[in-house]
Structures are given as C-alpha cells and as structure tokens.
Image (cartoon, rainbow, N blue to C red):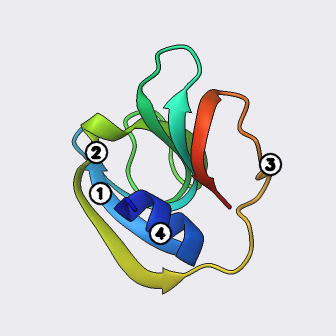
Amino acid sequence: MSALTEAIKARLEIEFTYDGHHRVVRPAAHGTHIDTGNESLRGYQVAGTSKTRMPPLWDMFTVSKIVNLKVTQRRFDEDPEFYKRGDKHMGTIFAEL
C-alpha cells in the first residue's frame, strides 16, 4: 500500500514540496487523472504556500512532482469542506475518504 493510500485511510495530514512550495495537505483521493492518466492526488491544502493562491484550498497534484513526502501523525476527523466522494477528475481511484 502506498504512503498516500495509507494517509487517506488513516486520515493523516501529509507534507511535501510541490513546484518549489512547501505544502501541508489533507489527502482526499488518490488515483489517476481522467484525461492525462497521470497518478494524482486530490487534497485540501491547509498550510504552506502556493504559486497562485493562499491556503486553505483544494488542488490536484501530480504524484511524480511531489518531493519529500512525509506522512505526519496529525489526524483529521472531519472531511475537508466541500469534499465529495467519486472525484470526477479521476478515472481510477485507488483510495478516497
């Protein structure tokens, strides 16, 4: 089982670098992007930075661009705001909240 799948199932926040920005994310869905087929992560960024917006925000991350992934011990019990199962941007979903 991948670290992303484990983090989703255990509802643990993750931290990583993406496009040069440190991110703290509540992972919601891990699968493949419906258009590109790239392995992807849908997550709710709660801290850190982004090149376009300030958190909190929803984003889709290409897994191959995630650097220094760390699964934290910070658990979240509630689904992130506006979360919906069955992400329509994913063709195959490996794990979801």
- Earlier-in-chain disc, 1 versus 4: 4
- The circle on residue 7 is 4
- Earlier-in-chain disc, 2 versus 4: 4
- Earlier-in-chain disc, 1 versus 3: 1
According to the image, label 1 marks what residue?
A: 16
- Please tell me whether mark 2 or mark 4 is closer to you in this view: 4
- 5 with respect to 62 (left or right): right
Q: Are marks 1 and 2 in contact (CB under 8 Å)?
A: yes
Can residue 2 be seen here? The reply is yes
Residue at position x 38%, y 51% in the image: 49
Is 95 drawn above or below residue 42 in the view shown? below
Can residue 11 be seen here? The reply is no
According to the image, label 3 marks what residue?
A: 84
Q: Secondary structure at mark 1?
A: strand
- Please tell me whether mark 1 or mark 3 is closer to you in this view: 3
Q: CA distance from mark 4 to mark 3?
A: 18 Å
The image quarter containing residue 65 is: top left
| Residue type at tag 4 | Ala
Q: CA distance from mark 1 to mark 3?
A: 23 Å
